[in-house]
Image (spheres, coloured by chain):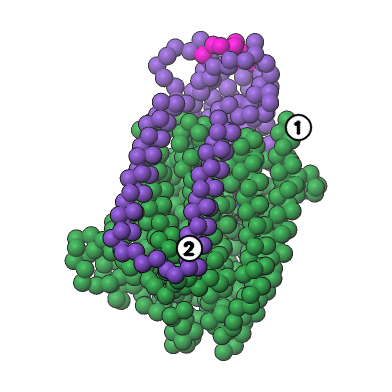
Chain colours: A purple, B green
């Protein structure tokens, strides 16, 4: 996912920069005499183009939401975050099962970030005092994973972590 | 250039003085958070030890000083530039500048002496847990003092506008109902929209500060989710409005380099009024990862974030491109820098819209992707634009000519430096490197490498910036003496 995000952003950005460059080059010649109406016509084409693109993205996004659904989880893990550690009711998880983490915090806001063994972020949720956030995940590969704190929570924020095992 | 700001300003000596003093001061002050940025990247790269554990103090000071300096500079540039239509009260502005400087000094005291290393958006309840008691008191007082400073300044600008236009005209409502009797320059309309949002933000900040005060004085604890919502309406919106204030100035300055004008009309008025509506709801994208927030609000957040991006692309960015396409441009340091900065604003905007998509945010939130996109449109966007306006003003006030090496050498050096800084954040975000980590864990070693490369780019930027700031400051001083 991260790589795809980066690639989409790079391609879009390179196109933007090319357009800016081409227009810049054009400005060095005699200015184009285009009427205001034609420009506006183009503006509306751009408007509709982007609107359609955003609409597709909007509804595509809604079908990949990370929020909990009605489906029953197979395993429920309680998580308590506090400066600067995570306490899990269980740190061995089952592969291919729908796991629900119920996460809260005892002091400040932390965040529960799940990293795989190669250091890729698989997903996250905030850990807030007096709230329980339910994060659903299904691990398809057994192995060593890590929980890293992803919300700045004080001087040892970057050391707040917990290994978990999926098997 | 069609206008001569120097002559206009001759009639308002006091306003010119206070503007030039602030601009010179901002150029120097800016070095401080840049150096904090350099220190942070060096610590993350393991180039520099951090024996006193000051990384998070640098982080907090960097973020807040940057926002403080550039919000103020945008206000200064705006009140100076708009004075060719309506003149804001220099006296009110002087009081604001004094408050802002005092506020900034208090802030630095709270962060470094009071040890309030709480991040630029001081997420509740962090400020109740970190730092000394004196630090907390001074920190919140400094936010109050800064807020009053900005509020006064915004009021000064609104009072000036009110001398010539009604409230409805200022927001372009007469264009919307097709009653085009009074011409309102786009700069005035866009600035008014932004300032209105800033005033709303500041009022929300008052509520936030009162809730903190309540918790200081009584045993009641606040609700963390509510506090987070309040923090981000305030924080997110004020930063965005800083960008829009700068865009307002682009509408005024940029077309002068093609001997033309960005005209106000019904479409533009509609666009900016919808921005005002939409932008207050875009901040919800900061809370996607708070699963306790109702889902409907998350969708509104995604919708509003997309909307803000759409309006920016179709109106401002398209207009800049169409203008350049149809005009013979005079390309100097200012116009090139504005143009490039608009492209960086676009690039950052694309990254922002991608990250405002909930499933993407699930994996990119609080990684370096976040500083990547906002440094794109804040640092290589808005700040570069403000430096470009300063350059234009400096040429006027010192009756100076631009030497060719300025745009041929200085501009690329500064810009490539800045772009490299931003690009390393993007690489970090793509590699899942968390933001706000003083030290990267061994499995995220690539973060260390990107930080080291960033250090090189920061030095490149600094080299260019120091020369530019030297020239600018000297011209502003000359301008003051005239
Ligand atoms: C040479 C220029 C700059 C450098 C080297 C720089 C560097 C940095 C670094 C290293 C961070 C921390 C990233 C992390 O989370 O690990 C950061 C955060 C930040 N920067 Fe910059 N920056 C620069 C310019 C700017 C500008 C111009 C602005 C705004 C106008 C800005 C606003 C911020 C803010 C708001 C944060 C977030 C602070 C926080 O997380 O509490 N920066 N910057
Ligand atoms: Cu934590
Ligand atoms: Cu943390």
Task: From the image, tell me which residue sits under label 1.
Answer: B442
Q: Residue at x 49, y 23 (%)?
A: A134
Q: Residue at x 36, y 49 (%)?
A: A46
Question: In this rendering, does residue B79 appear at all?
Answer: no
Q: Which mark is residue A26?
A: 2
Residue positioned most to the front: A30
Residue B49 place in picture, x, y as percent: 81, 47
| B408 versus A50 height, above or below | below
Residue B105 place in picture, x, y as percent: 62, 64
Nearer to the camera, B185 or B82: B185
Nearer to the camera, B331 or B146: B331
Quadrant where the C terminus of chain B is found in the figure: bottom right
Nearer to the camera, B232 or A44: A44
Residue A132 place in picture, x, y as percent: 49, 25
Question: In this rendering, does residue B26 appear at all?
Answer: yes
In this picture, which residue range is highlighted in magenta? A89-98
Residue B148 lies in the magenta-colored region: no
SS state under label 2: helix
Image check: B55 left or right of B196? right
Residue A90 lies in the magenta-colored region: yes
């Amino acid at each position: 996912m991260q790589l795809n995000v980066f690639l989409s952003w790079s391609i879009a950005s390179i196109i933007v920069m090319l357009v800016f460059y081409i227009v810049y080059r054009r400005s060095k010649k005699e200015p184009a005499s285009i009427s205001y109406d034609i420009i506006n016509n183009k503006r509306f084409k751009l408007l509709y183009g982007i609107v359609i693109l955003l609409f597709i993205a909007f509804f595509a996004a809604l079908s990949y939401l990370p929020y909990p659904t009605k489906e029953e989880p197979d395993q429920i893990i309680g998580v308590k975050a506090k400066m600067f550690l995570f306490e899990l009711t269980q740190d061995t998880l089952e592969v291919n099962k729908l796991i629900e983490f119920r996460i809260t915090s005892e002091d400040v806001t932390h965040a529960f970030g799940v990293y795989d063994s190669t250091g890729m972020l698989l997903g996250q949720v905030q850990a807030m005092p007096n709230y329980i956030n339910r994060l659903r995940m299904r691990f398809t590969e057994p192995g060593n994973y890590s929980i890293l704190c992803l919300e700045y929570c004080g001087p040892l924020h970057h050391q707040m972590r917990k290994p978990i095992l999926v098997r | 250039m069609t206008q001569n700001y120097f002559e206009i300003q001759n009639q308002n000596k006091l306003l010119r003085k206070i503007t030039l003093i602030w601009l010179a001061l901002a150029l120097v002050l800016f070095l401080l958070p840049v150096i904090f940025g350099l220190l942070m990247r060096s610590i993350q790269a393991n180039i520099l030890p951090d024996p006193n554990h000051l990384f998070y103090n640098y982080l907090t000071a960097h973020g807040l000083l940057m926002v403080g300096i550039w919000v103020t500079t945008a206000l200064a540039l705006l009140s100076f530039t708009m004075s060719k239509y309506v003149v804001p009260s220099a006296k009110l502005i002087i009081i604001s500048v004094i408050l802002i400087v005092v506020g900034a000094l208090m802030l630095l005291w709270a962060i470094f002496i009071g040890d309030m290393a709480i991040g630029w958006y001081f997420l509740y309840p962090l400020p109740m847990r970190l730092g000394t008691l004196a630090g907390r008191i001074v920190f919140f007082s400094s936010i109050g003092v800064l807020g009053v400073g900005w509020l006064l300044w915004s009021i000064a600008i609104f009072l000036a506008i009110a001398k010539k236009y009604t409230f409805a005209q200022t927001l372009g409502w007469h264009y919307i109902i097709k009653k085009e009797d009074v011409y309102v320059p786009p700069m005035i309309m866009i600035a008014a929209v932004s300032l209105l949002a800033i005033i709303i933000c500041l009022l929300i900040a008052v509520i936030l500060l009162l809730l903190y005060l309540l918790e200081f004085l009584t045993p009641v604890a606040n609700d963390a989710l509510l506090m987070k919502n309040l923090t981000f309406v305030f924080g997110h919106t004020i930063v965005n409005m800083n960008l829009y204030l700068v865009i307002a100035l682009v509408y005024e300055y940029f077309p002068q380099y093609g001997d033309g004008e960005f005209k106000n009309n019904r479409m533009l008025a509609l666009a900016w009024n919808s921005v005002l509506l939409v932008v207050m709801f875009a901040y919800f994208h900061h809370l996607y990862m708070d699963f306790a927030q109702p889902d409907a609000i998350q969708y509104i957040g995604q919708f509003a974030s997309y909307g803000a991006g759409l309006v920016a692309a179709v109106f401002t960015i398209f207009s800049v491109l169409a203008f350049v396409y149809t005009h013979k441009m005079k390309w100097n340091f200012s116009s090139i820098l504005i143009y490039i900065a608009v492209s960086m604003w676009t690039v950052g905007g694309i990254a922002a819209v991608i990250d405002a998509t909930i499933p993407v945010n699930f994996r990119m939130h609080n990684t370096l992707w976040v500083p990547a996109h906002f440094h794109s449109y804040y640092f290589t966007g808005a700040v570069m634009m403000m430096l470009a306006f300063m350059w234009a003003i400096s040429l006027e006030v010192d009756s100076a000519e631009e030497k060719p090496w300025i745009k041929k050498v200085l501009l690329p050096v500064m810009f490539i430096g800045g772009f490299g800084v931003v690009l390393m954040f993007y690489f970090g975000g793509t590699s899942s490197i968390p933001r706000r980590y003083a030290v990267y864990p061994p499995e995220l070693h690539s973060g260390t490498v990107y930080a080291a490369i960033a250090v090189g780019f920061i030095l490149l930027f600094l080299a260019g910036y120091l020369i530019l700031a030297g020239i600018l400051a000297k011209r502003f001083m000359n301008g003051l003496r005239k």
